[in-house]
Image: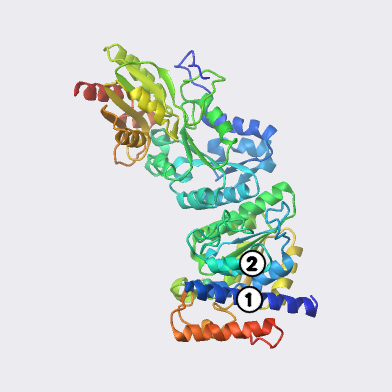
Amino acid sequence: MDKNQLQDLKILSAKIRLDVLKMLEKRGYGHLGGSLSIVELMSVLYGKQLRYDAANPKWEDRDMVVLSKGHAGPAWYSALAEQGFFDKEWLYTLNDGGTNLPSHPDRLKTPGVDMTTGSLGQGTSAAAGIATGFRMKGSGQYVYLIVGDGELNEGQCWEAFQYIAHYKLNHCVVIIDENKRQLDGTTKEIMNPFDVAEKMRAFGFHVQKVKGNDEEAIDKAIDCAKEVEDQAVCIVLDSIKGSGVPYFEQLAGNHSVKFNNDEILGANHEAIKALESFIEGGSELCTD
Amino acid sequence: MYRLAEDRNSKGKELRMCVVETIQEMMTYDDKVVALEADLGGASGFTKIQKSNPDRFVQCGIAEANMVGVAAGLSVTGFKPYIHTFGPFATRRVFDQMYLSGAYAHNTINIYGSDPGFTVGANGGTHTTWEDVALMREIPGAVVCDAADAVQMEWILKEFAKSEGIHYVRGNRKAVRNVYAEGSEFTLGKGNILKEGSEVLLIAAGQLVSDALDCAKMLEKENISVEVVDMFTIKPLDEELLLKEAEGKQLVVTFENHSVYGGLGSAAAEVMAEKNVPVPLKRVGVKDCFGQVGTPEFLQKEFGLTAEDLAEEIKKNYKMR
Ligand SMILES: [Mg+2]
């Protein structure tokens, strides 16, 4: 990837992150931490790797995304809006009665969303089925399955992983967002995941681990995954819940955040300002 | 149009073979039909589909929740999945997957839940489902059927392929007595009047339709005139037929290989109560208890689901009027 392309992805990441912060502040609450930890992934997918037509979301040959950690919908909606799947104004209707952008993704409501998710674990099997369908059609399409690390508590994930590995469904790119936290605490405290990458290797996957906020590394890992023949593929994102906003990274209980006090609003406004300035080309962003 | 079988005491082909052959036949003209199993291919005969149509068969292993999710994903890509496992695993075990990845997401999954109720036989209480119909009825938009015989099973499976959504049919794996003549045609959501009668309206579903017909014959000898309806589509229920045929009767009886909670009897009761039907209703089915092991014949007696049990219930309730 050349420098310009990388800069474009970084700007797209900034836009997605900015949209997430603005839409959740407008809503007053929302799933902040787990949305922010997949911003760079969304940027690489929608900025470079995915085949899609925003003007024709049902285009027959499109790649698909299954956001099994459905509560990160705001990050997905932001990416879709930035790429023109729908009007950006929709972002400010999150969770309104009758909205097209419900807290958890709904394939019947949102252009670009191909599978309904939210009951954790279920997206893994759906993605496995989608990849099976692609293989039956011989179409060569890809499905990108995004799973949370807390979500790995769900047994269904492991049923799906053994299926994906058994059938060597290498067009189902399994991406685990290992942000090390879940709703009630750290993943280690709640239900120790031990070494997720090793577990996936033991299940039969080709596994890569990359920094979750590094567009170039994520892109390379996906390229590399596409080269793998005859084996299922997994990318573990070594990410930070609340990524990209130091205040939110540090905030305890950042799974769902209420924008209801001056401290949080102040931190959010500061982050919004920095992102806007970066997007306008006026500054460098301070990442980690 | 449907016609009754000439010899109602003979059995048709095994329902599982009927399912297998019907799916194989559909696969000859519809490349979207896919069969999924959860390591019961030897029990269901689905291994024959694996042999005949390897590129349209998916072995999911003993992981029913994943199988339902995979079926949903296949539906997303335009396929028409037919899945099999034993009734309790096809419904109770995978209810959230069926509800959300299936129905809520507007995906299509066709389900054959085998060996319902007493037909479980030697697999016993852990494998018994008396609640599959109740669960599936709760899923918005789902179609819920109980096949009376092989002729009807074949028709139901082919009908399922014609529409999108969650379609459930329960049925024995083994052969059951014939109710219908070959080539009979039905309508989803419409009950079939199999025998006219003036005093009692007897509504049955599944293989118990045969026992209901036996019971009606027995009661004729005691001068009780029984009309028999095969309500093979439990959802959507044929309310119109129920209301029309209940009119002027002394008693309405439902007869099901299922709990009286949430199944055919409940469905009929809901309609009759809301429409103020002034006819007493007796629900004959299983009452708030678990299954157990034994031969199907033993279990049918044990749970009070034989034609004789039904006749007793009808006489008792009929006389009480
Ligand atoms: Mg997490």
User: What x and y, as percent, mark residue A21?
Assistant: 56, 76
Name the mark nearer the viewer: 2 or 1: 2
Is ligand 1 closer than 8 angstroms to the Cβ of mark 1?
no
Residue extending farthest left: B320
Q: In which quarter of the image is residue A73?
A: bottom right
Q: Which of marks 2 and 1 is nearer the N terminus?
A: 2
**Which residue was labeled with disc 2?**
A81
Q: Which residue is drawn at 63% across and 82% down?
A: A275
Q: Which amino acid does label 2 sit on?
A: Ala
Q: Which chain carries label 1?
A: A
Q: How many marks?
A: 2
Q: Work out whether A21 lies above or below A143.
A: below
Secondary structure, mark 1, is: loop
Left or right: residue A285 compared with residue B211 = right
Query: Splitting the image into 4 quarters, where does residue B56 fall?
Result: top right
Seen from the viewer's position, the closer of residues B305 and B184 is B184
**Residue at position x 60%, y 72% from top?**
A38
Residue A265 visible within the image: yes
| Residue underneath mark 1 | A212
Q: Which residue is drawn at 19% across and 24% down?
A: B320
